[in-house]
Image (spheres, grey):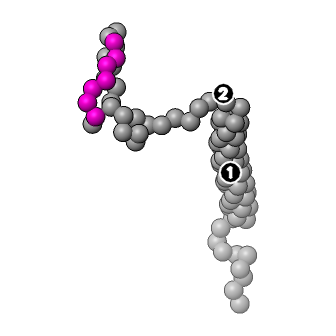
Amino acid sequence: MFNYGDDGYPQDDDEQFYNETVYNEDYYVEHEREIISDSDLELELGRLENEAIREMREEGLLRPTVRLRQAGLPKLHCSPGARCDFGSKA
């Protein structure tokens, strides 16, 4: 009859393998929890930023912006240190 406990390896090797496996599993579980926590914090920050922007608009502290090209307005040409002038629509 085969003895499953007598696989030719010392008992210490099995114990060391078990301890390393448990340590690695604990490490990765903790690492995944940190990643999830960071992701949750980023989502919460985005939600708070959007809420703050909405509140500022409601209070009249921030006006909605419109892109010039979408509004059909001419493109504004500016160079550093010079005056800005309107060019042609493009």
Q: Amino acid at mark 1?
A: Ile
Q: Residue at x 36, y 34 (%)?
A: 73
Expressed as whole percent of the image width and height from the top left, the position of residue 2 reads 69, 86
- Looking at the figure, which quarter contains the N terminus? bottom right
Q: CA distance from mark 2 to mark 1?
A: 35 Å
Q: Is residue 36 above or below residue 82?
A: below
Q: Magenta residues?
A: 83-89
- Looking at the figure, which quarter contains the C terminus? top left
Residue 76 found in image quarter: top left
Query: Visible in this render: residue 3?
Result: yes
Any magenta on residue 85? Answer: yes
Residue 15 found in image quarter: bottom right
Nearer the observer, 19 or 90? 90
> What secondary structure prevails in the magenta region?
loop
Q: Amino acid at mark 2?
A: Leu
Query: What residue does disc 1 label?
Result: 36
Q: Is residue 86 above or below residue 34?
A: above
Any magenta on residue 15? Answer: no
Left/right placement of residue 67 relative to residue 2 reads: left
Other-residue count near label 1 (Cα within 10 Å), few / some / many at <14 / 14–19 / ≥20 = few
Expressed as whole percent of the image width and height from the top left, the position of residue 16 reads 70, 57
- State the SS at label 2: loop
Query: What residue does disc 2 label?
Result: 61
